[in-house]
Image: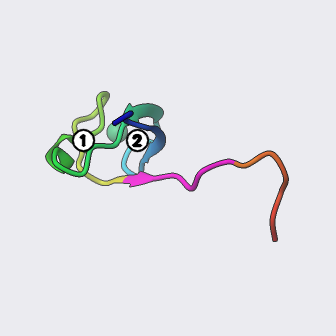
């Protein structure tokens, strides 16, 4: 099974980064810059904007 990369954003320092989202490894959701765990997964971007 292929893993998917998602965009994450740190709510503490504002850094955005891409990482694999593995449901079995959710503890890795920490900011690589400030090590905060206030990281939110960004919604997937599709080609067409949907409102
Ligand atoms: Zn951060």
Mark linked to residue 20: none
| Residue 33 vertical placement versus 44 (above, below) | above
Q: What element carries label 2?
A: loop
The colouring scheme, among rainbow, by chain, secondary structure or one colour, is: rainbow
The residue that mark 1 highlights is 30
Tell me the quadrant of the picture where the N terminus can be found.
top left
* Residue 43 point in image, percent of width and height: 57, 56
> Which residue lies at the image location 37% right of the left edge and 35% below the top edge?
3
| 27 and 30: which is toward the camera | 27
> Which residue lies at the image location 52% right of the left edge and 52% below the top edge?
42
* Residue 13 point in image, percent of width and height: 40, 41
Q: Distance between the residues labelled 2 and 1?
A: 12 Å
Horizontal relation, residue 7 to residue 45: left or right: left
> Which of the four quarters of the rendered structure image does ligand 1 lie in?
top left
* Farthest-out residue, bottom: 51
| 50 and 34: which is toward the camera | 50
Does the Cβ of the disc 2 residue fall within 8 Å of ligand 1?
Answer: yes
Does the Cβ of the disc 1 residue fall within 8 Å of ligand 1?
Answer: no
* Farthest-out residue, top: 33
The residue that mark 2 highlights is 13
* Residue 46 point in image, percent of width and height: 72, 49
Q: Residue 42 colored magenta? A: yes
Q: Which of the 4 image quadrants contains residue 50?
A: bottom right
| Residue 8 vertical placement versus 19 (above, below) | below
Residue range highlighted in magenta: 40-45
| 41 and 34: which is toward the camera | 41
> Which of marks 1 and 2 precedes in the sequence?
2
């Amino acid at each position: 099974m292929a893993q998917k990369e998602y965009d994450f954003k740190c709510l503490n320092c504002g850094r955005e980064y891409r990482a694999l989202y593995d449901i079995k490894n959710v503890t890795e959701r920490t900011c690589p810059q400030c090590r905060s765990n206030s990281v939110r997964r960004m919604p997937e971007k599709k080609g067409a904007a949907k409102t």
